[in-house]
Image (spheres, rainbow, N blue to C red):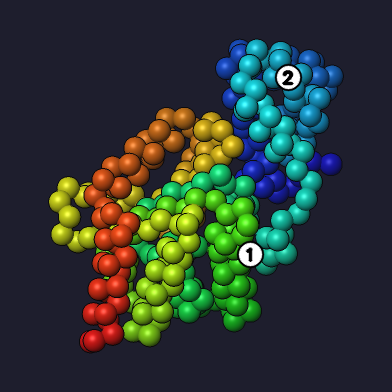
Amino acid sequence: MPRSQPTARQRRLGAELRKMREAAGVTARRAAELIGTNPIQMSQVEAGKAGISEARLRYMASQYACFDTALIDALVAMAGERGKGWWEEYRGLLAHGALDLAELEHHATYMRMLQASYVPGLLQTEAYIRALMAYAVPPLPPQHLDALVAFRVRRREVLSQDSAIAFSALIHESVLRTRVADRKVAREQLAFILEQSERPNVTVRVIPFDVDGFGGAGNSMLYVGGPVPKLDTAQIDAMHGSFWMDAESELTRYRALLDKAEASSLAVRASRDFIHRIAQEIRER
């Protein structure tokens, strides 16, 4: 039975198998013949709607003359995933995109983020999240709002677990000064960012208003490292949804944009002093 709603990760696996096949110049019909199936089943595999065994995946890779063993091993690991992540508890209650993001973060090897609009989700306090979500039009039902807040709070665990990955956040000064609620929430939010930046795996940098040469305020993004660079993902939020990019040209572009933004930021220690100063200003007003 084909999956009716494959996850982003399942779709990515299928897309990578399709890219591998197309790079080898093999038709979908021929690929189906190679593994003893039919074109319809092959199409479902490449769409993420059907799974594939390790033996079949490795045989396909050999027939496609793909010798990138690290990539093949990573795809085999993706194909063999059977467990249900904690985010599955919210399936049927929250949008598929939210669950896909939690799964993406869970499997990341590192994350880099640039934010010029809001505090990065993984650094938000519960009060900040609630104020942000409560701004939605039309207003969210209380039960749905509570679920969204609890879900985002739980996502933060990826930064504190035993095998926590490296997380680097570039935040524009406007983000730190924007009050999505009141002064109390703003102070608590700044204190939480400072607290999280004490973690050895978390780096927070600030891009100040008066820095020269920063024209990237419209490039807010999340860049997630995969087990191999070819499986990296760039994610962009927009008013009408979230967009995921995985083409090599797109990934190269977004890495370059992040590198350029980092060149405009303050050093890590200076950023902490900068955040302290903003918190003090809010306290004194």
Q: Secondary structure at mark 1?
A: loop
Q: Is residue 127 above or below residue 251?
A: below
Q: In this image, 6 relative to 240: left or right? A: right
Q: Which comes before the other along the chain, label 2 or label 1?
A: 2
Locate the C terminus and report the quarter of the image it occupies. bottom left
Residue corresponding to mark 1: 94
Cα separation between marks 2 and 1: 36 Å
Q: In this image, 51 relative to 213: left or right? A: right
Q: Residue at x 59, y 81 (%)?
A: 142
Q: Is residue 115 above or below residue 282?
A: above
Q: Residue at x 30, y 69 (%)?
A: 275
Decide which of 139, 273 is in the foreground and name it.
273
Q: Nearer the viewer, mark 2 or mark 1?
A: 2
Question: How far from the left and from the top, in percent, is residue 280?
Answer: 26, 80
Decide which of 125, 198 is in the foreground and name it.
198
Residue corresponding to mark 2: 60
Amino acid, disc 1: Leu
Question: How far from the left and from the top, in percent, is residue 217?
Answer: 28, 54
Question: How far from the left and from the top, in percent, is residue 51?
Answer: 77, 36
Q: Residue at x 68, y 29 (%)?
A: 73
